[in-house]
Image (cartoon, rainbow, N blue to C red):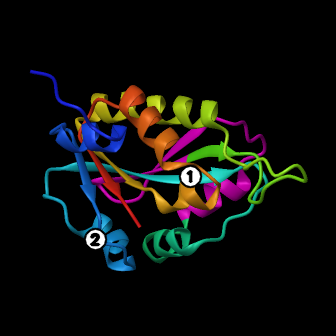
Amino acid sequence: MKYQYNTIKEIISLNRNFIILNESNDDNYVNMFENYKDNEIIIICNFTNIKNIWDNTFTNIIDSYSSRPKENYLNKIRKNLGDVDFIHITPNIFIANAIVSYNIIADEIGNTPINYGALRIALSTINNIAYRLNASIHIPKYILRWYGCSDDNFYNIVYGAIDTKTYIYES
């Protein structure tokens, strides 16, 4: 018997490795830092750009826990699309600064600043580290929307790049 699903999101939601949280409020993002088991290691994804601009709601939440991710990002001399830096901010929490955008606004033609190839590379890198650390991955999806990432492209890339336990925070 074949099942039909309207979207890749529906397929992902049936996979026990992926948990999609639909509530949209800042408490969800704060909970990423506070609601984990003592022995659980988590990697929180922070999607950034090559323009050296560190400014959105989620980065402000990160800053309230540690200034190291921001300092690491701003002090990095070379920024390449697809690069990921892992910053250990507590014994159990890593921030993965992933460079997936060449800008923060669309260009003069209207192309969105997200680079899907860089997103795929970054998520694969994060997945590999999560697998080695036996960690879960936490993705606040709204940052990618800010860069113009479509839901369909996001879910297709996630489904192809990640095979470890992942929490996707919708908003």
Q: Quadrant of residue 37?
A: bottom left
Quadrant of residue 119 in the image?
A: top right
Question: What amino acid is found at the position of numbered circle 1 in the picture?
Answer: Phe
Q: Is residue 84 magenta?
A: yes
Residue under label 2, please give it: 31
- 33 vs 152, left or right, is left
Whole-percent x, y for residue 121 in the image: 55, 29
Q: What residue sits right under mark 1 in the picture?
A: 47
Q: Residue at x 47, y 42 (%)?
A: 152
**Which residue is nearer to you in this view: 165 or 97?**
165
Residue 67 in view here: yes
Q: Is residue 96 above or below residue 30?
A: above
Q: Position of residue 92 (x, y in %)?
A: 27, 53
> In the rendering, at what x and y percent does residue 31 appear?
28, 71
In the rendered structure, find residue 118 and report the number of the disc placed on it.
none
Give the mark nearest the N terminus, 2 or 1: 2
Element type where label 1 sits in the image: strand
Amino acid at dot 2: Asn
Mark 2 residue element: helix
Residue at position x 39%, y 78% in the image: 26
On-image quarter of the N terminus: top left
Magenta stretch contains residue 2: no
Range drawn in magenta: 68-97
Nearer to me, 127 or 146: 146
